[in-house]
Image (spheres, rainbow, N blue to C red):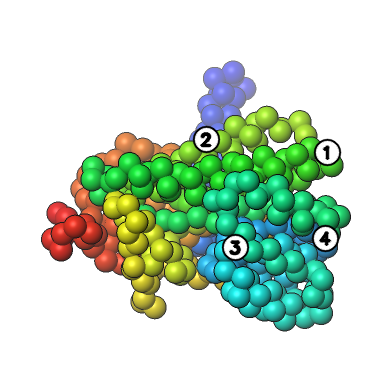
């Protein structure tokens, strides 16, 4: 058998394998409501049950994704530190965590700490409170944050600063506080609820998108610094999800809220499902998890791996239709009732 025949056979095998692999990925992204790796880890990876007994510190735990991530963790017996500004809501979440744990958690296993993440000077005090209560903290989930609906070119710089203070600088400060503890223990896990807006550029949310891209830069760098340690970093990137985020979202004007709402007919993932997938990503220590219902994930794959095709599609579709897909309505500038074309 000649050398050329052997090489042709080898290359044909490689080509067939590439085609099969590509077909497998295309099929998978249409089935899973998350990236392909996370979808397989959900079925064949480590179970969230392995988080039983772990101490998890969660910011923004009084509602939305933070609340439902707490429930998912409570169901497997993880001990919880619930933080947010609203004490009454935290107490409600605590009682529900104990209830859904079905006997795995007692009152002492869920610690409520009213906390404003913008008060950077209080971070160390609150984190040490959790350490004193449980003896240690295993996982920090940075979830607190706000979204935005605004025109890029008319956004007040004050809004940029406020959103970065909340979505970026408070996260960095609390993480550095946690790292002091993790470094002493030589183990720990930092998870940050980012967004698919941190992976691709989202129209009419310029400051929010910028803050999430900043989070990816900071925490991808941290992960690379900790590669030889037992400290892990996970970026959680949900797409459209049923939460109250639209009501609290920033606009382009200082001091203004968007006061939007979601509708049952919107194409969004439930907070329950998002919270559960967060726990799958954390227990399997993935670097980055994409979470969203079809066609959010295929669109993200195209944007990341086929940018020329994605840019062409965006030009054809237009930014307003992309926004409509995201929020199930066309964007309206806060200073004008006219729709953007």
Badge nearest the viewer, 2 or 3: 3
Residue pointed to by mark 4:
133
Residues at badges 4 and 2 in contact (C-beta under 8 Å)? no
Q: Position of residue 117 (x, y in %)?
A: 58, 53
- Which residue is located at x 46 percent, y 40 percent? 213
Element at label 3: strand
Q: Position of residue 203 (x, y in %)?
A: 30, 49
* Alpha carbon separation for disc pair 1 and 3: 26 Å
Element at label 2: helix
Q: Which mark is residue 184?
A: 1
Seen from the viewer's position, the closer of residues 146 and 284 is: 146
* Mark closest to the chain's N terminus, 4 or 2: 4
* Mark closest to the chain's N terminus, 1 or 2: 1
* Alpha carbon separation for disc pair 1 and 4: 18 Å
Q: Position of residue 287 (x, y in %)?
A: 62, 43
Residue pointed to by mark 2:
217
> Residue 50 appears in which quarter of the rendering?
bottom right
Badge nearest the viewer, 1 or 2: 1
Seen from the viewer's position, the closer of residues 247 and 64 is: 247
* Alpha carbon separation for disc pair 3 and 4: 18 Å
User: Is residue 30 at least partly visible in the picture?
Assistant: no
């Amino acid at each position: 058998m000649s050398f050329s025949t052997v090489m042709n056979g080898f290359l044909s095998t490689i080509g067939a394998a590439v085609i099969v692999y590509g077909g497998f990925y295309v099929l998978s992204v249409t089935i899973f409501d998350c990236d392909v790796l996370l979808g397989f880890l959900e079925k064949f990876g480590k179970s969230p049950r392995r988080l039983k007994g772990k101490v998890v510190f969660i910011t923004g735990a009084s509602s939305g994704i933070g609340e439902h991530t707490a429930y998912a963790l409570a169901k497997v017996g993880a001990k919880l530190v619930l933080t947010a500004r609203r004490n009454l809501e935290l107490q409600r979440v605590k009682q529900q965590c104990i209830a859904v744990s079905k006997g795995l958690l007692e009152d002492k296993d869920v610690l409520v700490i009213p906390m404003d993440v913008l008060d950077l000077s209080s971070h160390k005090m609150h984190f040490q409170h959790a350490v004193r209560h449980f003896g240690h903290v295993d996982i920090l989930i940075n979830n607190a944050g706000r979204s935005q609906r605004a025109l890029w070119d008319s956004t007040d710089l004050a809004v940029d600063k406020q959103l970065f203070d909340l979505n970026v600088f408070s996260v960095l400060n609390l993480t550095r506080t946690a790292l002091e503890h993790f470094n002493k223990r030589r183990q720990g896990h930092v998870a940050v609820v980012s967004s698919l807006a941190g992976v691709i550029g989202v129209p009419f949310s310029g400051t929010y998108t910028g803050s999430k891209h900043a989070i990816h830069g900071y925490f991808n760098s941290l992960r690379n610094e900790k590669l030889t340690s037992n400290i892990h970093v996970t970026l959680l990137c949900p797409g459209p999800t049923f939460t109250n985020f639209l009501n609290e979202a920033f606009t382009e004007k200082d001091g203004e809220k968007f006061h939007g709402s979601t509708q049952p007919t919107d194409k969004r993932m439930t907070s329950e499902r998002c919270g559960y997938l967060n726990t799958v990503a954390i227990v399997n220590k993935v670097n980055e998890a994409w979470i969203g219902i079809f066609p959010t994930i295929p669109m993200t794959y195209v944007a990341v791996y086929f940018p020329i095709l994605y840019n062409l599609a965006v030009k054809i579709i237009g930014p307003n239709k992309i926004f409509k897909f995201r929020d199930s309505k066309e964007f309206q500038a806060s200073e004008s009732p006219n729709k953007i074309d």
